[in-house]
Amino acid sequence: MPFAVDRSHLLVPRQGPAVLPMHRPPPLAPGDRIGIVFPAGPVRDRERFETGRRILHQMGFSTVCRPDLPAPGHYLAAQDEERAAELMEMWRDPTVRALIAARGGYGCLRLLPLLDFDLLRRQPKLLIGFSDITILHSIIQQRCGLVSLHGPVVASLADEDTDGLRHFHATLTRSAPPPIRVNNLRVLRAGTARGVLLGGNLASICSLIGTPFEPDFHNAILLLEDVGESDYRLDRLLTQLHLAGKLAEPSGVILGSFTEGGDPQTAWSRVLECTADVPVWANFPVGHSRRNLSLPLGLPVVMDSATATLLFQPALSA
C-alpha cells in the first residue's frame, strides 16, 4: 500500500506567547548618535561602508565607530572577546542611542556566552541589522524582552533603494511603524494571522536549534529569508526547522527573498509542506536584495492576506 505521510503533529495547538511582553526602545531623533559595531565579519568594501555611514549622517544622525576598521583577511572581525567587549561598550555608552552592525557574515553565535544580558535589559537601545545579526535579535528578545530592528547593516545601506531608505528612516523615528502593503506579494496560503514578529535569516535561526538560546516561535509571525543557499540546502534547513517542531509553532509565516542560490519556490513549497492551517506569504521585500524593508522584531503584527498588508501594533515603551 502507498506510504501515507502523517501530518497530525502539525496540528498540535499553539500555546502561550512567543516571548514575554516586549518593550520598544524610544524612537530616534535628529542628532542622535548611532554606534557602529562589528559583531560578525569585517568590512570587505570600505567604499560601500563609508557610503552607508554618509547615508546615516544625511538622515540627520551622528555615528561613532572604532577608528581602525578590522582587516578583511579573516571571516571574523576580531577575536570573540574583543567583538563582545566592543558591543557591550557601545551599549553601555549613554551618548549612543542605537547600535547598527557594520555588516553580517558570521560570528554572532560565538558571542552569546560573553554578553551581559542584565546590562542590555537595564539600558534598552535599538539594535539594527540583518543576516547573521538575526542571532543577536533573537537573544535580546528572549533574554531582555526588547524590540529590535531587522534592517540594513551599514555596508548594505549603499544598495538600498529610495523607498527602502525612506521606510528605514520612518521606522527609526516614529513611535508607530508604518503599515507595509506589498503589491507583488505571493499569498501561498490565505488568511489573517496575529502574533509577535520574530525570525530573520534562516541559516542563523537553524544554528540556534539545540542550544540554550533556541528560539520559541509559539503564536509568532515567523519571518524567514536567506542568501546563497542551493535548493537542497534550503530544503535541509527548512526540514531541520520542521523536525525540531519549529514550523508547527507560528501562527503565520512570511518568506522574504532567497537570492544568489536555488529557486525561491523550493523554499515556498517546502514551507507549505511543513506547515498546516496558517497563512503563508512569499516574495516579501526583506532580505539580501535591493529592497530590504526594515521590520521591528518583537512587535505584535497582523498579516492581512485580503489587502496584502502587514500592520504593526504598539508595544510597551522601554
Image (cartoon, rainbow, N blue to C red):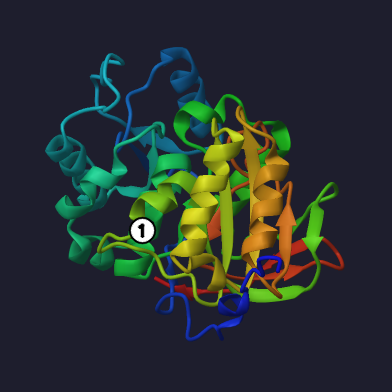
| 298 versus 16 height, above or below | above
Q: Residue 73 appears at what percent x and percent y?
A: 27, 14
For the residue marked with disc 1, what is the amino acid?
Ile
Taking the spot 50% from the left edge, 33% from the top edge, the residue there is 56
Taking the spot 58% from the left edge, 56% from the top edge, the residue there is 223
Q: Residue 264 appears at what percent x and percent y?
A: 69, 40
Q: Image quadrant of residue 275?
A: bottom right
Tag count in the figure? Answer: 1
Residue carrying label 1? 209
Q: Quadrant of the C terminus?
A: bottom left
> Which residue ends up furthest to the front in the rendered image?
1
Q: Residue 156 appears at what percent x and percent y?
A: 53, 29
Taking the spot 54% from the left edge, 83% from the top edge, the residue there is 14
| 259 versus 113 height, above or below | above
Q: Image quadrant of residue 162?
A: top right
Tell which of 243 and 315 is nearer to you.
243
Left or right: 289 in relation to 211: right
Q: Residue 233 appears at what percent x and percent y?
A: 52, 39
Tell which of 18 and 177 is nearer to you.
18
Left or right: 107 in relation to 221: left
